[in-house]
Image (tube, rainbow, N blue to C red):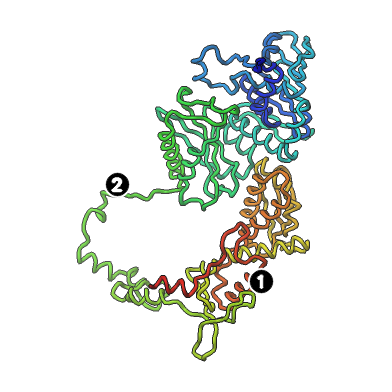
Amino acid sequence: MADVIELLSEHIANQIAAGEVVQRPASAVKEMLENAVDAHATDIQLIIKDAGKELIQVIDNGSGMSPVDARMSFERHATSKIKSIEDLFTIRTMGFRGEALASIAAVAQVEMKTRRHDAETGTRIVIEGTEVKTQEPCATQPGTSLSVKNLFYNVPARRNFLKSNTTELRNIVDEFTRVALAYPAVGFRFWNNGTEQHRLEPGSLKARIVALLGSSYEKNLVPVEQRTDLLNIYGFVGKPQAATRTRGMQFFFINGRFIRNAYLNHAVVQAYEGLIENGSFPFYVLFLEADPARVDVNVHPTKQEVKFEDDRLMYSYLGAAIKHSLARYNIAPSLDFTLNADIQRLPSVNLPVTDRQRDDVQKSYLFNAFASGGQAHAIERSDSMKQWKELYEIAATPSVMPSAAMPPETQQSAAFTGSEGKSRNSMMLIQGSLLVTTVKSGIMLIHVRRAQERICYERLLREWNNETTASQQVLFPATYELGAADALVLQDALADLARIGFDISPMGKNSFAVQGIPPGLAAGEEKQAIDEVVEQMKHESPDAVSSRTDKLLATMARRMAHNVQALSQPENQQMLVDELFACAQPDLTPDGRKTFVMLRKEELDAMLG
């Protein structure tokens, strides 16, 4: 039998490696920007056309390369960063494995122009699909210009799997943002289809955050700085009001490299416990500095997932540092007077109160002013307080509110007989969240908010299909500023949002004016609603148009389902029941949660034995 195992050709091996390193245009952008940073550039330009499918170009004023180094940079595993195995565990540069340029050149048409600062001429190299077409001297500026054209031109199946230009551009913006945040001392410029998107001057980290992510963060940044033997932490976290319903404004950097780490993210979220509502995400740009020997950055081709030698200790340090910063800036104050020695030495704290002092206080003007009955500010004395038992009995006794018969759709007749001898069903609102009503076979428990979700969803769906949704104009239009990547998502969603009643207009870079909102959406909640829509659309399937509509309407219905207070009136309770059972699918919310449950008389009898 003939041998069947053969070595892959260099061309195929490079294409396989490219599949790991270059998954989309943003992957090439990341590698190219990091190479420019490693070359000690102080000015880096990124030029994009057709969301990176036609052109990705990075121009830098870094150290440049000699003709030999320029050619060697396209060989697999050719790197200037590692000389021995020990070097692999003390990495402080961005790219180091020598795969980036070889992988990019395997799936694109690449042109490089590079020149060292002490050389009179530079080198031009043209490579297509790993094949060197040209290498010649050329006139060029010191530094390197790398152009990647027609990405995946020779791998059409990979090109067909690329998503829409909006999605691919958003991923490019994400990569640009991370590198630009990591190196505020480096100037960056970014062009997309001939239009300048960013011009970032070298400066402080705070200035870079504001210039890159928006001026709304300028007054919402809290500095963090903590130095320990194991870990140095510095950067900024956002005040609670800067928290959003969308992910994406959370940035961790370890030794200058952007990373994803759910465990450390949890430490940050825990530090905000009680300060932001559930489902919100705090803003942070945090830099961690640790001994490279304690951090393994080589666990994934993108080098965004890392392992730590002692992650539990880092978790503790990080959480403590953020809590300390929030408390220091009076965002989470800790009112513990036992820590203040001056307060502890006060006579009023140390000495017991005497009978004479108590009498003097009770005769004082302030005491009598607040103890006098019939006054709006009066405070009752302890000896005239109502009995706790009476208060508890009043609060615990439900008021049974009669209502009209259940709608015919339920096909269940009434089972409660009132004082007039007429059969009718009773309703009772429990703790503002559950509506209990009697039916012929037992009792029904309706989850009020979920019922409202179903009702709002079906109303929105009817209006969507009929294209009849009106927009409720707001008296004072609100300005809404997003990060660059989220702004692309919102721009793409404007037509759908207009169809459900939003009137949103772009106004300048990454800013929008909200002039109208859907009827039923409470004033002041437009920002949270738009946040939720943007977050939902960021994670949708590429071509799921019907799914987008369903999720959009479900998101809006969830935001509108909040008017529980109006159900204190019996007629409103009956209206809720009528509208719920007029729905096409009254038993479930749009995302599949139960809206009501039935407890039949047999089940109740069994519970009571």
The structure residue drawn at horizontal position 42% and vertical position 39%, both measured from the top left corner, is 320
Q: In which quarter of the image is the C terminus?
A: bottom left
For disc 1, the neighbor class at 10 Å (few under 14, some 14 to 19, many from 20) is some
Q: Is residue 134 positioned above or below 477 on the image?
A: above
Residue named by callout 2:
342
Judged left or right of residue 587, residue 144 is right
- Total residue callouts: 2
Q: Which of marks 1 and 2 is in front?
A: 1
Pinpoint residue 537: horizontal percent, then vertical percent. Answer: 67, 47
Q: Is residue 352 positioned above or below 361 on the image?
A: above
Pinpoint residue 219: horizontal percent, then vertical percent. Answer: 57, 44
**Looking at the picture, which amino acid does disc 1 mark?**
Ala
**452, 520: nearer the viewer:** 452
Mark 2 residue element: helix
Q: Residue 582 carries which label?
A: 1
Q: Is residue 560 positioned above or below 323 on the image?
A: below
For disc 2, the neighbor class at 10 Å (few under 14, some 14 to 19, many from 20) is few
Which numbered disc flags the more N-terminal residue, 1 or 2?
Answer: 2
Pinpoint residue 202: horizontal percent, then vertical percent. Answer: 63, 28
Query: Can the viewer see residue 187 in this picture?
Result: no
Query: Can the viewer see residue 242 in this picture?
Result: yes
